[in-house]
Image (cartoon, rainbow, N blue to C red):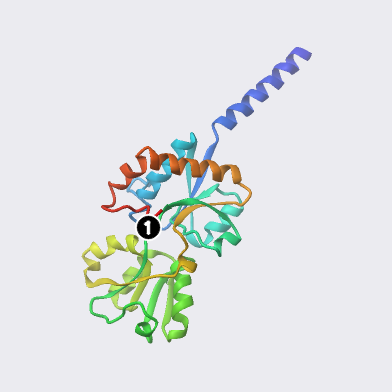
Amino acid sequence: MKKFTKLIIAASIAMCMFSTNAYALKLGVAAEPYPPFAEKDASGTWKGWEIEIANAICVAMGEQCEWVEVAWDGIIPALMTKKFDVIVSSMSITEERMKTIDFSDKYYNTPAVIVTPKGSGIDGSPASVSGKIIGVQVSTIHANFVSKHFDDSAASIKTYQTFDEHNQDLVAGRIDAVVGDSLALQPFLASDSGACCEVAGELKDVAVFGPGVGGGMRKEDTELKARFNEAIAKIRADGTFQKISKNYFNFDIYGAE
């Protein structure tokens, strides 16, 4: 009987060890498409630059990773309730967000811009948007910028759940401008429907936009943060980051050091 009990205990320990080794690091991604960073293909598989970079980070960490999708405006609460371990969804590192969560080192940085119909006369200054309707995706640093800089300019702010929705309203003439990430707006501007529009100005506010985009994590996950940062440094040092990036961009998306 004692021998049988020892065998059961040994088997239980072995199963626990196997479970630990097979652990899948869960990465949270916004369900809304955000090309060229993240979107689903026809088969429902996530693809895009950020997806490939995150998968490379997982390889560098020696982790099996699993993607968990959630609505953008609920992505931080989902992290805090442990539905996944890291937000990998073009989330900018900001002081406001760091009151709730922590971040890895940045893995890219691109400027924010205001996009308008060609010849609109809007340049991104508060005076130029007076009386205009500005579209922006909800719960983003771009929404924070618009709220901070345009609220007192007599502009009307219209928020959207997805990036594509405000682009569609801009084309339809229901709004006068959109504020968003310059790179994320490139596919729209290069499309037939986006031919109507142009980048009217670059928007700057380090306090709002922060130093770049990083992986969002729970504050207590300090070991995970250290390993994630080591993996970012590794794929940049061994050329993996550059190899993936050149398939999407003709410039250094990482930005200034």
Q: Where, quadrant-wise, is the N terminus in this rendering?
A: top right
Give 228 or 159, whichever is nearer the viewer. Answer: 228
Q: In the image, is residue 226 above or below residue 192? A: above
Q: Nearer the viewer, residue 183 or 159?
A: 183
Q: Residue at x 75, y 12 (%)?
A: 3
Residue furthest to the front: 257
Res 243 quadrant in image: top left
Image x and y of residue 170, in percent:
31, 74
Q: Secondary structure at mark 1?
A: loop
| Residue 126, position as x, y percentages in the image | 40, 82
Instruction: Please count the marks in the image.
Output: 1
**Is residue 93 shown above or below 55?**
below
Residue 179 at what x, y percent from top left?
38, 71
Looking at the image, which residue sits at the far right?
A: 2
Residue pictured at 60% horizontal, 46% vertical? 222
Question: Is residue 19 shown to the viewer in this render?
Answer: yes
Image position of 99 with respect to 118: above or below: above
Q: Is residue 124 above or below residue 218?
A: below
Q: Looking at the rendering, which quadrant does residue 169 occupy?
A: bottom left
Q: Judge whether residue 1 can be spotted in this image.
A: no
- Residue type (three-letter) at the residue carrying disc 1: Tyr
Residue at point 47%, 58% (across, down):
91
Other residues around mark 1 within 10 Å, as few (<14) / some (14–19) / many (≥20) = some
x then y, percent, for residue 244:
32, 44
Question: What residue is pinned by disc 1?
Answer: 34
Left or right of 108, for residue 98? right
Decide which of 44, 82 is in the foreground and name it.
82
